[in-house]
Image (cartoon, helix red, strand yellow):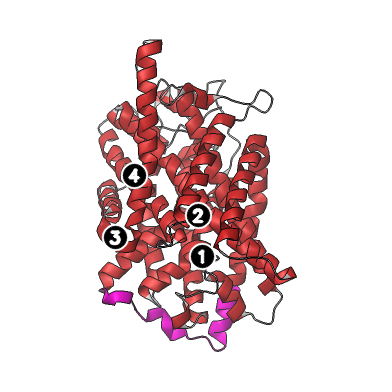
Amino acid sequence: MATQSTTEQVHDSDQGELKRAIGPRLLLFFIVGDIIGAGVFAITGDVAGEVGGVAWVPFLVAFAVAALTALSYLELVTKHPRAAGAALFVHKAFNVHFLTFIVAFAVVCSGITSASTSSGLVASNLLLGLDGLVGGVPTGDTATLLVALGFMVLLALVNLRGVGESVRFNVVLTSVVVLALGVIIAIGFWAMATDGDVGRVVVFESPGEKNVFAAITIATTVAFFAMVGFEDSVNMVEEVEDPGRTFPRVMLTGLGICAVIYVLVAITVVVVIPPGDITDPVNPEAGILLDVVRVGAPGLPIDDIFPFLTVFAVANTALINMLMASRLIYGMGKQDVLPRSLSAVLPGRRSPWAAILFTTALALGLITYVRLRSDSDVVVALAGTTGLLLLAVFTVVNIACLVLRRDTRTEPVFRAPTWVPYVGAATAAFLVGPWARNEDDHIQYSIAGVLLLIGVALWVLTWATNRGIRAQRTGFRDIDSLEEQ
């Protein structure tokens, strides 16, 4: 532990800084709400399909990997308490503008792929719920694609409306998430107390006769999608009361709460659903949790309500993701590392309309491309790409933490154990490799590569414009205010 530097104290006294209005309880609510979302609805069945009854183990391993990087984030955010997150830390460590850009754009792309995953879940559950209520509603691939695209357009309209309404609505949606998962866990406890096969939770099963290490590694990369989100809270640091004391305790508590919830949900799935049905849900796009309700509580009306609970819960994740992605694109356009036109805002609302349209267009194209590929699992491809991008970012952030330890001019309030950034970087980098994915899931590299190439092309275009027309260098002028508007 160390005290805050004089530099940071001076910053805290600046009149232009954000109001520190977020206390420990509100921060905990934000972190839990940000982590618990589309992940647990999207991929619990896929995790169980890789390892059988021990599906709770990959969630614990994913939690451990996330916790290591969270400790590095905590050291960095208490040393540099600004709202720009990973891009700021990498910029402070290496001062390579193009590397900073790649990290920032990778975070943008992770938000877009996560929101695209959520759009599919929303579409599938909405159509199934309506079909259960009124009947005759199409639930096939074409209908799901159209509704998913429509949902992304709706998110863009909400985003254009302004961030204020979005943040307030987040509280309601987070409550719906907790309610939906509470239903699942209650069904699990009821099954364990009656006729559920509790012995299944220690049975390892893997398709293709993979060994335990290989199967758990692959399942962990799938489960990792459910643990991301904690890094978004770093962007709230300038609005948190006493961040040096509050952030470490609350972030680790939030991660722990989410890990317990995910483990309980995974146990419920393997106890309630027969082994042969876990990898074959009634509607793969809607996820296995809907089947848990159907099988575990067939006589309750919650069976008809649950798809709509899932819609609200997953919509929360998508909204946060697209808000974050559009604001980062806006910030990079404003600083002339992306075309300046992307920083355009609506005159009245002050919403970054150009950045919103750009990120929405990427999401629409991504959803259409993946869904039209008949040989790919949509949820695994998009969720896995989110995890891939963030694991790569986490690798660089852990290395940045090691580099910034050499700078003693500003000391962190919280210091992670010496070994944490080393192990955090190594584990995150290991899970980036092709050995951590099934061969069918290597499409994730193609998706991530295309998205990053779009960013690089825009950087090159901006560089040429800046050099040829404005006679200026291309680089971040004020990385601290990357997401400010």
Bounds of the magenta segment? 186-210
Category of crowding for the residue at label 3, using alpha-carbon neighbours closer than 10 angstroms: few (below 14), some (14–19), many (at least 20) = many
Disc 3 residue type? Ala
Q: Determine which residue is flagged by label 1.
A: 261
Category of crowding for the residue at label 1, using alpha-carbon neighbours closer than 10 angstroms: few (below 14), some (14–19), many (at least 20) = some
Q: Main secondary structure of the magenta part?
A: helix
Q: Are marks 4 and 3 in contact (CB under 8 Å)?
A: no
- Please state which of residues 427 and 372 is positioned toward the viewer in this rendering: 372
Q: Determine which residue is flagged by label 4.
A: 449
The secondary element bearing badge 4 is classed as helix
Category of crowding for the residue at label 4, using alpha-carbon neighbours closer than 10 angstroms: few (below 14), some (14–19), many (at least 20) = some
Q: Determine which residue is flagged by label 3.
A: 436
Disc 1 residue type? Ile
Judged by depth in the image, the label closer to the viewer, 3 or 1, is 3
Earlier sequence position, callout 1 versus callout 2: 2
Judged by depth in the image, the label closer to the viewer, 2 or 3, is 2
